[in-house]
Amino acid sequence: MSFAKSSLAAAWILCPIRAGDGGNWNLSRQARRVVCFAGDPPSMNAKPRWIVAAALVLLVSAIALARRTAPSEAPDATYVQAFEKWKAEQTEDLRANWLSLAGLFWLKPGVNSFGSDTGNAIVFPKGPAHAGEFDLAGQEVTLRLQPGTHATIAGKPVTTAKMDPDTSNHVTRVEMGTLRFHVIIRGQHVGIRLRDTDSAASRDFKGMMFYPLDLNYRVTATWTPSTGNKTVEIPNALGEVTEEVSPGAVAFQLNGSELSLTALGGDAKSGLFFVFTDPTAKSDTYPGGRFLETDGVVDGKVVLDFNRAHNPPCAVTPYATCPLAPKENRLAEAIPVGEKFDKAAHGHH
């Protein structure tokens, strides 16, 4: 006699009726099997409580299954139109600001020569062979151009200039032919981010890939603001971890599970910013996590629309420095909506 585990739970087994349990061996094999608790199988004269218990477990299992497999409500035309507009804006931002990146160069203290000649400390993909140098002192960068190198800042020709970084309110952006570059600061690192307005990667981009829309993954969450002293450790694409103050967290239900996410930025009035990851990262979505932005919080509630979860810029370029999902935002529940990761096109990032 053999017993097999039921698909409902490990606590259940299928038990064949013995010949002495009614003597009807003319029943089919399926008909001669009943579901019972693990342990000693009950006899056919078992008290009704076994039947009641079995019925309750089956009912609970059916309800849980129904919750997890509820048919998706079809989005209306207004929702689809708004989603497509948002998607177009995201695509344009990728083309203009991220796919056009042509380099990221971390500076060393002192003189850093640059140009298209391979003998430079920083080698640009095009432009003058010996364009000039970046002088780094502490976190201050001074641009010095070689005679004959033409470049502009705010439309005006320049030969030397102090370059304000992206962490300032007035970042200095230099134009040299189709190249654009500025200073970035990430922790203790100071670098030059280079962009090419004539980027083949930007021109050839085939667009963002998404799962089908599913309104089951548009949920209302409860917002709990922090008291101003809650911090979260945020890893980034450079392999570093920074500690930042979080504005708060949200709690919500999804497919019968109680989940939460910690906001990494934004505020309750204008909207919140999250970076999260989930089991789909093993196969379909970006391993480092996806970004999710919201509208403002209203009466302690905020809508999380995971259909708008999208990849960080690091998914399409090696020249971006992105926050990755902190441990607080690693969901156990799969989120099979939002943007997918095109491994064929960007799997090397």
Image: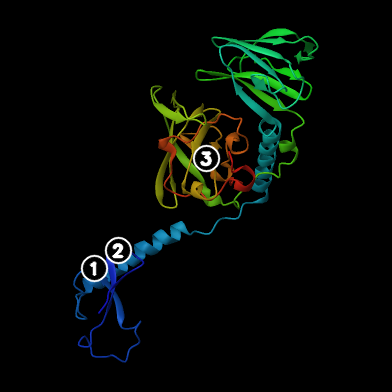
Question: Label 3 belongs to which residue?
Answer: 303
Residue 281, position as x, y percentages in the image: 50, 46
Query: How many residues crowd around disc 2 within 10 Å: few (fewer than 14), some, or many (20 or more)?
Result: few
| Residue type beneath disc 2 | Ala
Q: Is residue 141 left or right of residue 19?
A: right
| Residue type beneath disc 1 | Ala
Question: Label 1 belongs to which residue?
Answer: 38
Dot 2 or dot 1: first in sequence order is: 2
Mark in front: 3 vs 2 = 2
| Residues at marks 2 and 1, CA–CA distance in whole angstroms | 8 Å
Residue 90 in which image quadrant: top right
Q: Secondary structure at mark 2?
A: loop
Residue 263 appearing in the image: yes
| Residues at marks 3 and 1, CA–CA distance in whole angstroms | 44 Å
Q: Is residue 218 left or right of residue 206?
A: left
The residue closer to the viewer here, 119 or 66, is 119
Question: Label 2 belongs to which residue?
Answer: 10
- Asked if disc 3 and disc 1 are in contact, CB closer than 8 Å, the reply is no
The residue closer to the viewer here, 250 or 232, is 232
Mark in front: 3 vs 1 = 1
- Asked if disc 3 and disc 2 are in contact, CB closer than 8 Å, the reply is no
- Asked if disc 2 and disc 1 are in contact, CB closer than 8 Å, the reply is yes
Q: Is residue 336 left or right of residue 180?
A: left
Query: How many residues crowd around disc 3 within 10 Å: few (fewer than 14), some, or many (20 or more)?
Result: many
